[in-house]
């Protein structure tokens, strides 16, 4: 059975997280999404290291990052109440399994404590069953024009 390591990213992980993001984008080729801006990706990664968190998953045998979740604390636009917003959740296809997704989300839950966690999926990746199993409720849909 494979064993995995889950940890909070730091500066030394940024280049590998960028490469992981490129794998994610390649999976979304048919969606006509904008090209990756390296400078923008690194700005977001830097911002999350400073004001949010990035939890990584790696396989113990090679330490390569095989998945990550990036998130930050924010407020509802209509309320002073805080929540945590997941910016992305991604695991490379050959390692996708419930254990990895659960541990990444558990990392978010541990930091969020009792604050709500919001996650909006704007790709065609099918995570509904996994998210329901992890306790998320479906709250509407995402729509895209163009």
Image (spheres, helix red, strand yellow):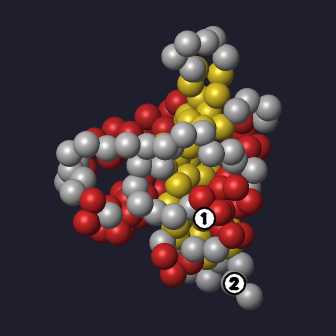
Q: Tell me which residue sits at (71%, 79%) in the image.
A: 3
Point 62% across, 33% down: residue: 84
Provide residue 18's location: percent of width, then percent of height: 36, 57
Question: Is disc 2 surrounded by few (<14), some (14 to 19) or many (20+) residues within 10 Å?
Answer: few
Q: Residues within 10 Å of mark 1 (few under 14, many from 20)?
A: many
Eyeballing the image, is 52 above or below 29?
Answer: above
Q: Position of residue 10 (x, y in %)?
A: 53, 49
Quickly name the residue at label 2: 2
Question: Which residue is located at x 20 percent, y 45 percent?
Answer: 146
In this rendering, would 76 be left or right of 19? right
Counting every numbered tag in the picture gives: 2
Q: Earlier in the sequence, mark 1 or mark 2?
A: 2
Q: Is residue 96 visible?
A: yes
At x 40%, y 55%, the residue is 123
Q: Nearer the viewer, residue 81 or 71?
A: 81
Label 2 near label 1: C-beta < 8 Å? no
Name the spot of residue 80 as percent of width and height, x first.
Answer: 63, 11
Reply above or below: 43 against 89.
Answer: above
In the picture shown, does residue 12 fall above or below 117? below
Residue tagged 1: 57
Examine the image and state in which quarter residue 45 appears: top left
Residue 41 percent coordinates (x, y):
32, 46
Mark 2 lies on a secondary structure that is: loop
């Amino acid at each position: 059975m494979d064993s995995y390591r889950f940890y909070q990213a730091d500066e030394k992980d940024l280049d590998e997280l960028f490469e992981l993001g490129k794998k994610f984008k390649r999976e979304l080729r048919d969606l006509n999404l904008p090209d990756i801006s390296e400078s923008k990706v690194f700005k977001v990664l830097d911002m999350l290291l400073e004001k949010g968190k990035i939890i990584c998953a790696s396989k113990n045998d090679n330490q390569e990052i095989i998945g990550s979740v990036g998130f930050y604390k924010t407020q509802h636009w209509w309320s002073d109440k805080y929540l945590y917003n997941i910016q992305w959740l991604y695991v490379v296809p050959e390692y996708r399994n419930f254990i990895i997704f659960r541990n990444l989300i558990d990392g978010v839950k541990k930091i969020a404590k009792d604050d709500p966690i919001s996650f909006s999926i704007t790709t065609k990746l099918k995570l509904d069953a996994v998210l329901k199993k992890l306790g998320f409720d479906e709250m509407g849909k995402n729509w895209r024009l163009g």
